[in-house]
Image: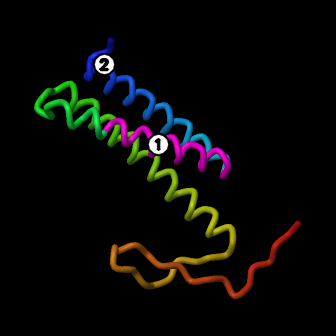
Amino acid sequence: MKTVLEQLRTAGEQLRALFADERRAISTLDHAALEQITTAKVELARTLSTLRSQLTTKDPEIRDLFETLRTEARATALLSTAANLTVRSMLGYKPANAYDRMARQQTASPGRVLARY
């Protein structure tokens, strides 16, 4: 039977693989794959949360594992943001001279969107 630490490592590796799959899906704008990955990530996050509550966070190996997962999550979020800005730019949205409450630059909608099919 696997120990809690081994289960945590396995779940962490599965989440890292999901983040890699998510980045590939973002880069190809594969919406269906992104939906499947999101569902799997939610289930895996619950598992990680349960396992983490059973261990002490003072263990360096556990801290390193979660720091690695945070790094993967940040990389995925950055790619998602870049893809979002690129698609909006292609649709004609331009950066506005305004910022929202989170200090993110707002965009001005295009006068009209000309779709080509």
Residue drawn at (58%, 77%) of the image: 94
Residue bearing mark 2: 6
Distance from label 2 to label 1 (Cα)? 19 Å
Q: Is residue 39 left or right of residue 59?
A: right
Give the number of callouts.
2
- Residue at image location 43% in from the left, 33% down from the top: 16
Side (left or right) of 101 relative to 83: left
Residue 47 shown left or right of residue 76 in the figure: left
- Identify whether 51 is placed above or below 75: above
Does the magenta run of residues contain 30? Answer: no
- As drawn, the residue found furthest toward the top would be 1
Occupied quadrant, residue 5: top left
- What residue sits right under mark 1 in the picture? 41
Magenta span dominant secondary structure: helix
Nearest the eye: 36 or 83: 36
Magenta region, residue range: 31-48
Pointer 2 or 1: first along the chain: 2
- SS at mark 1 in the image: helix
Above or below, comparing residue 53 to residue 29 in the picture: above
Q: Is disc 2 placed on a helix, strand or loop?
A: helix
- Where is residue 72 drawn, in percent x and y? 40, 40
Q: Is residue 27 left or right of residue 4?
A: right
Query: In which quadrant will I find the C terminus?
Result: bottom right
Does residue 40 show up magenta in the picture?
Answer: yes
Q: Amino acid at mark 1?
A: Lys
The quarter of the image holding the N terminus is top left
Residue type at tag 2: Glu
Number of other residues with Cα within 10 Å of mark 1, as a class: few under 14, some 14 to 19, many 20 or more? some
Rendered location of residue 85, percent (x, y) = 56, 64
Residue at image location 50% in from the left, 51% down from the top: 79
